Image (cartoon, helix red, strand yellow):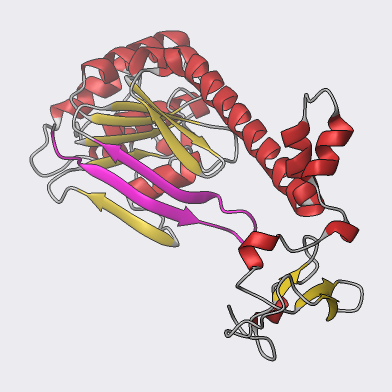
Amino acid sequence: MAPPILKLDNIYLSFGGAPLLAGVNMQIEPGDRVCLVGRNGSGKSTLLKMAAGLAEPQNGEVYRHPSSTVRYLNQAPDFEGFSTVEAYAAAGLGPSDDPYRVTYLLEHLGLSGDQDPESLSGGEARRAALARVLAPEPDILLLDEPTNHLDLPTIEWLEGELVKSRSALIVISHDRRFLEKVSTATIWLDRGVARRLDQGFGHFEAWRDKVLEEEEIEQHKLGKQIEREEHWLRYGVTAGASATCAGSASYRTCARSTVPTKARWAVPKRPFRRLANPVSWWSRRTGSPRPLATGPSSRRSRSGCIAAIGSVLSGRMAPARPPFSRC
């Protein structure tokens, strides 16, 4: 496996409420063609800007290979300072890049190099921006809505260019057919967390539905577990006895023999024969011990221990500190 050329580790970003990105991890290797999907407002464009180095996370680390080149297609290209379309597109080239590449791209995108960038329509501006990021054939290509304002023949041409390109690609788009054509992996940004599927967008929906169904089952199990815990805390031993006696033909007899009532909170003879002499009932109403019996044996215990008994949540554990001795 080749080492990653781009890695985002534990990325966190919040604007005061629920975090937009809560520990996002993403790794891109050479040749990956990844589509980044998620609901509107889930942080896709923000994450792409962090990958390009145009935004910083509040926590986490962004690693880009030192020798890799990155190009980012913004949704709103900035033509300020450029007199012609060719000059704008050529500004994306590096020192070792082929300048003829700009001419080739402008021709296939239906643009004239001597046009004034400020006079371009929305579709023409998008094509000029594509020529600028595609010309240097970067190691990492980050595209945010590349098909906006493009006609169908141009979209199909762009699909072919991206498929045969050697650049690693991360693309955000609402064009489902475009994503199915160009992607080989899918990263789903959902509730601040990124999940990866090593298949193209065509397999995304079935995988997403399966993930959500598994989550729903786990939440249902957790809800039942919490419900059982709350029932136990509320009813204590009675809950256990009810479960033990469930299905018994004589439930009342079973429950009576299993669950001690207040009057039958007596100390078993064998366990306490040599352990304790005085026995106290810890009263929840008064919050203090109340003598119940003098113990099963007339011999006093050398340890001087007492047995504190009572119902669940009655506070019978409180006597563990003085003036009561610990057993």
- Nearest the eye: 304 or 160: 304
Front position in the image: 183 or 266: 266
Q: Is residue 108 left or right of residue 166?
A: right
Read off the magenta span: 2-28
Pick the residue in front: 53 or 85. Answer: 53
Magenta span contains residue 310: no
Q: Residue at x 46, y 9 (%)?
A: 152
Q: Position of residue 265 (x, y in %)?
A: 81, 61
Figure quadrant of the N terminus: top left
Tell me the quarter of the image containing the C terminus.
bottom right
Q: Is residue 180 above or below residue 6?
A: above
Q: Position of residue 288 (x, y in %)?
A: 84, 81
Between 323 and 235, the residue placed more toward the observer is 323
Against 205, residue 94 (above or below) is below
Residue at 65% across, 67% down: 272
Image check: 165 left or right of 144?
Answer: left
Residue 209 x/y as whole percent: 56, 19
- Residue at (41% x, 55% y) in the render: 55
From the viewer's perspective, is 20 left or right of 183?
Answer: right
Picture quadrant where residue 239 is located = top right
Return the x and y of residue 178 as percentages of the image width and height: 43, 15
